[in-house]
Image (cartoon, rainbow, N blue to C red):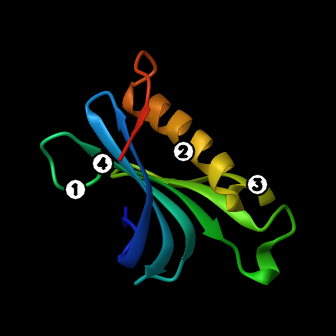
Amino acid sequence: MAFPRILTAIPQQRYRYGDFGVTILGDVESGDDRAYRYVAAFVREGENQPQLFVVAETLPPGRREQGSHALRVINTAMDEVLDVDERWARMSDFVAQALQTGAQMLGLEQEQPYQVQ
């Protein structure tokens, strides 16, 4: 699967979640054909590359029948849209869902995320 090609982005929030650091990126300029509103990158402690991305992707006008933003999950095994809705354009809704999705996919259900500076 093709991970997001991020040219520039501004970190908005950071979390510690079990053995993972999670960075929420905004103001994303991508080097691929997707327009990312937000990106949550899950990086295992001691590693450099994310194992999982949860992204809010702004859909083009012709694909907005169900909503303006797609919630997409990308890892080495899959690249799949989980939901399309307007709410993924709101950071608070996106972050809550990204953390929950990451927990399910990475086996972190017994852990609690906490925000770090």
Which of label 4 and label 2 is nearer to you? 2
Real-space Cα separation, disc 4 to disc 3, in angstroms: 25 Å
Q: Are marks 4 and 1 in contact (CB under 8 Å)?
A: yes
Residue at (44, 80) in percent of width and height:
30
Real-space Cα separation, disc 3 to disc 2, in angstroms: 12 Å
Q: Would you name the residue on which mark 3 appears?
A: 87
Which residue is at the front of the view, 98 or 34? 98
Q: Are marks 4 and 2 in contact (CB under 8 Å)?
A: no
Across and down, in percent, residue 13 comes to 45, 52
Q: Mark 2 Cα within 10 Å, few/some/many (few <14, many 20+)?
A: many
Q: Would you name the residue on which mark 1 appears?
A: 49
Task: Determine which of the numbered discs, if any, sits on residue 98 in the image.
Answer: 2
Real-space Cα separation, disc 4 to disc 2, in angstroms: 14 Å
Task: Tell me the kind of residue under disc 2.
Answer: Ala
Dot 1 or dot 2, earlier in sequence: 1
Across and down, in percent, residue 42 comes to 35, 47
Q: Mark 1 Cα within 10 Å, few/some/many (few <14, many 20+)?
A: few
Which residue is at the front of the view, 73 or 103? 103
Residue 25: quadrant of the picture: bottom left
Which residue is at the front of the view, 31 or 37? 37
Q: Mark 4 Cα within 10 Å, few/some/many (few <14, many 20+)?
A: some
Residue at (29, 53) in percent of width and height:
50
Residue 86: quadrant of the picture: bottom right
Q: Would you name the residue on which mark 4 appears?
A: 51
